[in-house]
Image (spheres, helix red, strand yellow):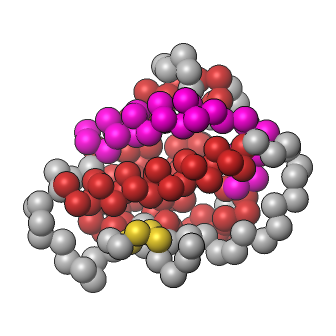
Amino acid sequence: MTGEQNPSESLYDAVGGLEALRRLSNTFYDGVLADPLLAPVFADFTRTHIEHVAVWLAEIFGGPARFTAELGGHQALLRSHLGLSITEGQRVRWMELMTVAVQKELPDDELLRRRVLEYFDWGTRIARDVSAAPVGEDLGDPGPTPRWGWDGLQGGS
């Protein structure tokens, strides 16, 4: 499918919907939990985390807005990173493991994979920055859940 994107198709549809995002999350977290650098960050990990991540990604990539409707939206996602003190080394390792998962679980489409990984690079930088603040920090209003498409962040900074 390389090079055959339909510009009206969301990244959500192009990756294969929620089931593909569940597979991606499962593969990724299998790697994370076995990784000595990242496993400590996920000390409180539960399998429901995989579903929450898949639902978040579905919304980010243009699918149903269930994370906002059911799981607290952008504010809840940001707050879940408070106090984790994520290092740049951990962020880079996270990206390495996500790249492996993307290559394994998403369609063999170079542009699609690049756009998805660009989102993860952007998002992990925010997570790293937010994680430096203590649990309970007032983050203010981060606005609505971002959307990421074929041209990157949609209508935002």
Which residue is located at x 56 percent, y 31 percent?
90
Q: Judge from the rendering whether residue 7 lies leftward or rightward of residue 57; answer left or right.
A: left
Which residue is located at x 48 percent, y 35 percent?
92
Magenta highlight on residue 148 = no
Count of numbered tags: 0
Q: Judge from the rendering whether residue 54 lies leftward or rightward of residue 17; answer left or right.
A: right
Residue 37 shows in the view: yes
Magenta highlight on residue 103 = yes
Where residue 145 sits: x, y (%)?
60, 70
Give the magenta part as a residue range: 78-104
Residue 63 shows in the view: no
Q: Judge from the rendering whether residue 108 lies leftward or rightward of residue 43; answer left or right.
A: left
Quadrant of the rendering where the N terminus is positioned: bottom left
Quadrant of the rendering where the C terminus is positioned: bottom right
Q: Nearer the viewer, residue 52 or 143?
A: 143
Picture quadrant where residue 104 is located = top left
Q: Magenta part mainly helix, strand or loop?
A: helix
Which residue is located at x 55 percent, y 48 percent?
124
Where residue 82 sits: x, y (%)?
77, 45
Where residue 91 sits: x, y (%)?
54, 37
